[in-house]
Image (cartoon, rainbow, N blue to C red):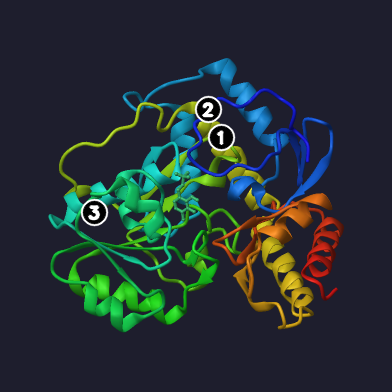
Amino acid sequence: MTGTGRAPSHEFASSSQRPLSIARAEGAYLWDDSGRRYVDLGATHGVGNLGGSPPEIVRAIEAQARQILYLGSGYRNPVRDAFLEKLLGLLPPSFTRVFLSNSGTEAVEAAIKIARSATGRTEIVAAMRGFHGRTLGSLSATWRKELKEPFEPLVPGFRHVPFNDVAALEAAVTGSTAMILLEPVQGEGGVHVASEEFLRGARSVADRSGALLAFDEVQTGIGRTGRLFAFERWGVVPDLLLLAKSLAGGIPIGATITSDAVERRFRGSHHSTFGGNPLACAAGIAALDVTVQGRLPERAERLGLLAKERLAELSSARVREVRGLGLMIGIELKERVAPLLAELEERGFLAISAGATVIRLLPPLVIPEAEWDRSLNALLEVIGHG
Ligand SMILES: Cc1ncc(COP(=O)(O)O)c(C=O)c1O
C-alpha cells in the first residue's frame, strides 16, 4: 500500500476512496506518487476511454487555452459550433439540439426538465438497478435505496420497473409519464445488458403513450460497448441521448441531445455557467476524432470478444456469470469481490466493482493488446482458475 504516511486528506468523505494516491497517467497506465505503475482496468470510472492524458486532448486544450479559456453559452463560439456539428454528424438525423453541461448527473437533470416541460407531465419511469447520478433529480431516478435514503424526500413521481421486463414497463407507463429513462447497459448496477426486445418495447410504449424515451449513455457512450453509441447496436433511437464521462477525453462535460421537435415544445429556461465552454468543446472535437479515426469502437468490440473467450475458462465454482458488451464487462462472483480487487491491486491492476459481487472491467479502449491479455491472465489467476 502506498500513499500512506502522508498528512490526512481534507476531502469531504462523501464516498469510498482507495488508500492510493495517483499522480500521473499515460495510456492505459496510472502511477502512484511513489512511482509504482498500475494498469487502469476501470478507465478511472469510465472517463478514460482514450487512456490517461491523451496527447491529442492535451494539444487541443493547450491551443484552446491560448485562444479563449472560458465563454458561457450567452455567446456563440466557433469551437462549440464545430464540436456540436461533429457530434451531431455522428448521430441519426433526428438529433439536432444539444444542451451542454459538465457532468453525467447534469445531463440527466437537463433531460428531466426537458421531458417534464415538453410533455407537460411529471412522472419518470426508470429501471431497477439503474444508476443516473447523485443530484436530487438523477438520484430519484437511481435505484439503490442506500444511496437515496439519507437524502429523502427526493423528487416525487419516479417509478422503477425490472430491467428487461417489457410487460412491467408497459404497465408502469401512463398518460402522466414524461420520460422513460434507461441505460442500454446498466453500469453501476452490475453490467446488465438490455435485451433488444426491451429497448424496442420501450420505444413503442413511449410512442403510444406520448412519453419521451431517454437513453443514459453516460457510461456506455463513445465507443465503450463496441459501437460509438450503444443504442446503434439495436437500432432503437431515443428522443433524448445523455452523454458525459469520456465525451471530452477526460475534460468535464455533459450533453443532453434531442430533436427540434422536442425543443419546440420546451417551455422555461435551463442554463449552466460552464456548460459548452470552449476548453471542453475543443477537447470534445479531439476526443471524437481520435475515437472515430482510431476505429476504437471496433477495437472495443474485438478486445471484448477476446475477453469473453478467455473468461469462459473460468470455472463456475466461484463465478456466477460473465456479461457485457465490448470493453464493458462484468464478472459476477458468488462472493464479495473486494478481496480480489485488493489482490489485483497488489499485482499492479486496478479494477473496480459494480455492487458487492461484480468485478467491472472498463479498460481504456486504447489498452495495448498484450497488456489486455496480461490483465486477463491476472484475473484468471486471481479468481483461481487460470
Ligand atoms: C449511467 C450513468 N449516468 C449518470 C452518471 C453520473 O455521472 P457523473 O458522476 O458525471 O455525475 C453515471 C456515473 O457513473 C453513470 O454511470
Q: Nearer the viewer, mark 3 or mark 2?
A: 3
> Which type of secondary structure does the marked residue at label 1 adopt?
loop
Question: Is 269 rendered above or below residue 139?
Answer: above
The answer for how far apart the CA atoms under marks 3 and 1 are is 27 Å
What residue lies at 54% left-to-right and 62% top-to-bottom? Answer: 355
Question: Is 12 rendered above or below residue 334?
Answer: above
Of the pair 139 and 335, the residue shown nearer to us:
335
Which mark is on residue 115?
Answer: 3
Q: Is residue 232 left or right of residue 382?
A: left
Which mark is on residue 279?
Answer: 2
- Neighbor class of circle 1 (other Cα within 10 Å; few <14, some 14-19, many 20+) is many
User: Ligand 1: does it lie within 8 Å of the C-beta at label 2?
Assistant: no
What residue lies at 55% left-to-right and 17% top-to-bottom? Answer: 67
Instruction: Look at label 1 and name its amino acid.
Output: Ile
> Which type of secondary structure does the marked residue at label 3 adopt?
helix
Q: Position of residue 102 (x, y in %)?
A: 44, 36
Residue 199, located in which quarter of the rendered image? bottom left
Question: Is 73 rendered above or below residue 298?
Answer: above
Residue matched to label 1 = 251
> Which type of secondary structure does the marked residue at label 2 adopt?
helix
**Are the two marked residues, 2 and 1, in contact with CB atoms closer than 8 angstroms?**
yes
The answer for how far apart the CA atoms under marks 3 and 2 are is 29 Å
What residue lies at 34% left-to-right and 23% top-to-bottom? Answer: 75
Of the pair 212 and 133, the residue shown nearer to us:
133
Which mark is on residue 344?
Answer: none
Instruction: Look at label 3 and name its amino acid.
Output: Ala
